[in-house]
Amino acid sequence: MSKAQTQLNSERRRSRQIFERAEKVLVGGVNSPVRAFRAVGGEPLVIDRASGQYLYDADGNELLDYVCSWGAIILGHAHAAIAEAIADQARRGTSFGMTTELELELATLITQAIPFLEKIRFVSSGTEATMSALRLARGVTKRDFIVKFEGCYHGHADSFLSQAGSGLATLGIAECPGVPQALAGLTLNVPFNDLKAVERVFSAHKDKIAAVMVEPIAANMGVVLPETGFLKGLQELAHRNGAMLIVDEVITGFRLKNGSVQDLLGIEGHLITLGKIIGGGVPVAAYGGRAELMNQVAPLGPVYQAGTLAGNPLAMRAGIAALKQLTMPGLYERMNELAERLVRGLRDELADARIPAQVNAIGSLATIFFTPGPVRNYTDAKRSNTRRYARFFREMLARGIFLAPSQFEAAFLSAAHTPADIDRTLAAARESLQAIAAEPAD
Ligand code: KE4
């Protein structure tokens, strides 16, 4: 174990004590599996507070954060405008169970940024958004099958848990127990970037597919970019076959620019799902599309979906404060430039260390895959040397740099990251890669 690693671990006594107690009452000591560090080893973090680009664990260790609450924290932790909005709303009431003008305000900020989005429904998690969008597609088309892509993750609703990315890929769960075969059989998985496979599945299930759901930039098998023509071809295939295209932008929504990534990619789905960033770090997600389609949702239409805390004023205030900040001139340009410098630097460090690896990246999203070949789908991603990723993760953490604790996740930059953070990260990467290069690859 390197000196740095020894130093960090020895100072994490309180974190360890808290986690051991947590394991007695929380399953695995966590409320979401990927937080358990099962794929990277070492002791899971216990965080006490955060500010800007930094997390502070229960032992006061400062960590430069590239997880950013899995992409939700794009402005940096404890952003003053968001904190003040939440504090003010807490004094005015957190949830009324009735409509407020705040829901209208956040919906307006979102639809102004995404013009094709005419009507929206707020929910409290990305899973609720994707689950509801799928139900709407099935209700309107009166069809049952869904096409999704191997390695993509759309939350933990039953229809999305086969060949899924994120925590299922991390834990090697290909098919989740508890999902009735009758339902699992309605989910058709095809490889990302493989239009021929999509054509074949449409031919084999003529007029039976309700929707194709896709992450436009896959980020739950690690970052995998759509190849030229893939998304446009997918949209055409869906339209030609009477199926809906549901574009899951829970990660990409407001990540690469102030709005949807779809106009950058030349597509427009029937439905879009959003989450993470639109809540400013507080539970907000949404699904939406053209009014004619969304009007099929209760109370206007028969497709039912509901939620006690959906659109609650506390969460709306946080989302409004966050989205208002995202219109600041130059915010995305600065963040994306920093991210591009980090990615270039990582590629250089990997080459200098003579370690075969790919860095897939776009905007402030990136993943290092320890594999010599290109990573263009889940099969490629699974070829990565996940042991080596785990070693790199632990070496970087020992140097105070917190990367995603899984090969099958993305690293995120926030608007709070600085050029000095990039320099520090690249210096830590050089040391970490040197430590790894000296070891056998497998
Ligand atoms: P939530 O239900 O976790 O809010 O959102 C589900 C979801 C839907 N769609 C996409 C594209 C997503 O990435 C997610 C959730 N992302 C994971 C991380 N890749 C959440 C982290 C976790 O599960 O703890």
Image (spheres, rainbow, N blue to C red):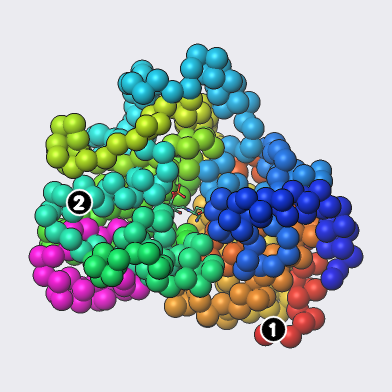
Quadrant location of the N terminus? bottom right
Mark number for residue 137?
A: 2
Q: Is residue 182 magenta?
A: no
Q: Is residue 81 visible?
A: no
Pinpoint residue 412: horizontal percent, then vertical percent: 58, 51
Going by the numbered disc 1, the residue's amino acid type is Ala
User: Residue at the spot x=18%, y=61% of the render?
Assistant: 144
Question: According to the image, label 1 marks what residue?
Answer: 441
Placement of the C terminus among the 4 image quadrants: bottom right
Residue 134 percent across, percent down from the top left: 26, 52
Q: Amino acid at mark 2?
A: Ala
Q: Secondary structure at mark 1?
A: loop
Disc 1 within 8 angstroms of ligand 1 (CB): no
The segment highlighted magenta reads: 187-214
Among the 4 quarters of the image, the one containing residue 404: bottom right
Ligand 1 closer than 8 Å to the CB at disc 2? no
Q: Residue furthest top?
A: 92
Q: Is residue 245 left or right of residue 279?
A: left
